[in-house]
Amino acid sequence: MNGPEGARELWVRGVPEPELHVFRAPRPDGSALLSLPGGGYQFLSVQNEGLDVARFFNPRGTTVFVLTYRLPGEGWADRAVAPLQDAQRAMRLVRARAAEFRVDPERLGVVGFSAGGHLAADLATHFDALVHAPVDAADRRSARPAFAALVYPVTDLRRWAGDPVSGNALLGPRPSPALVAARSPVRHVGARTPPSFLVHAFDDPVVAMDNSLDWIAACRAAGVPVEAHLVARGGHGFGLHLSPDLPGARWPELLAAWMRNLARGTT
């Protein structure tokens, strides 16, 4: 199945338990990405926004971990935080086994797309929230990403709460204003929010550009380093597959360069 600009699609539904898939760099430089595919919290676009992330970043020295997180509408009692539970646990497991994976725990970041971008933003602002009971010693590790790359992300669920499909996929029908606010990451950006890298297209018909603009403003207000690449054309769901004649197609290269500079302290 083909997606935007010819991107291949492999969608996953029915996730009985989260799985973390490891794609090792042949010549690891210590950098690592936890990749969170999107899909409106109704499916996971694991090819376009997971496997293809590994295909691009592995040759550049970055080990990629693709998380198939639980989908909130598939029977979980704690649906509003089930994906966040999985993302926190994934970060901690990677850090606990960093030597085995040959990654630097201080260079482990997160990249998320669309709903996965919401999850990445939620992780970036709620990395130390107690959303599940500790499982083992790994849960003593920090779940804070070294950085957060947000690609056409949802950052404010207040924009979606009235939508009977997208707005309710995470929170369920008729969520309370308090729950909507709690799971709107842009409202929780603070000094400990990690540096952020954003990609968004102005012609995105699914997730409004305001989600990224508001995140940029919140980071600036909190003194959090932020870099953003806002492009005229691209639509939604392009992953790493924008047409090469569009300037936005270079965003993966720009992210790789930004990650290197961040590690050097020059971002």
Image (tube, rainbow, N blue to C red):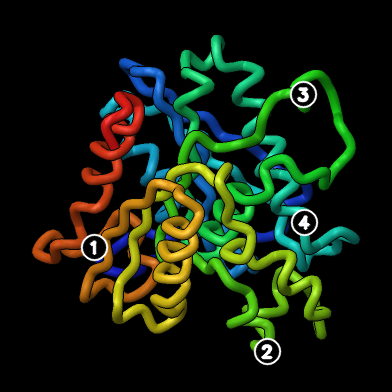
Can you identify the residue that label 3 sits on? 140
- Extreme top residue here? 99
- The image shows residue 171, relative to residue 161, as above or below, that is above
Q: Which amino acid does label 3 sit on?
A: Arg
* N-terminal-most mark, 2 or 3: 3
Q: What residue type is labelled 4?
A: Val
Can you identify the residue that label 4 sits on? 81
Residue at mark 4 to residue at mark 2: CA–CA distance: 19 Å
Q: Which amino acid does label 1 sit on?
A: Leu
Residue at mark 1 to residue at mark 4: CA–CA distance: 32 Å
Give the image location of residue 126, x and y in percent: 68, 49
* N-terminal-most mark, 3 or 4: 4
At a point 46% along the width and 40% down the height, the residue shown is 147
Q: Nearer the viewer, mark 3 or mark 1?
A: 3
Can you identify the residue that label 1 sits on? 242
At a point 83% along the width and 79% down the height, the residue shown is 176
Q: How crowded is mark 3: few (under 14 residues within 10 Å), some or many (20 or more)?
A: few
* N-terminal-most mark, 4 or 2: 4
* N-terminal-most mark, 1 or 2: 2
* N-terminal-most mark, 3 or 1: 3
Give the image location of residue 97, x and y in percent: 62, 16
Q: How crowded is mark 2: few (under 14 residues within 10 Å), some or many (20 or more)?
A: some
- Assign a secondary structure to mark 3: helix
Q: In which quarter of the image is the N terminus?
A: bottom left
Residue at mark 3 to residue at mark 4: CA–CA distance: 19 Å
Left or right of 102: which side holds 199? left
- Assign a secondary structure to mark 2: loop
At a point 64% along the width and 87% down the height, the residue shown is 163
Q: Nearer the viewer, mark 3 or mark 4?
A: 3
Can you identify the residue that label 2 sits on? 162
Give the image location of residue 76, x and y in percent: 85, 59
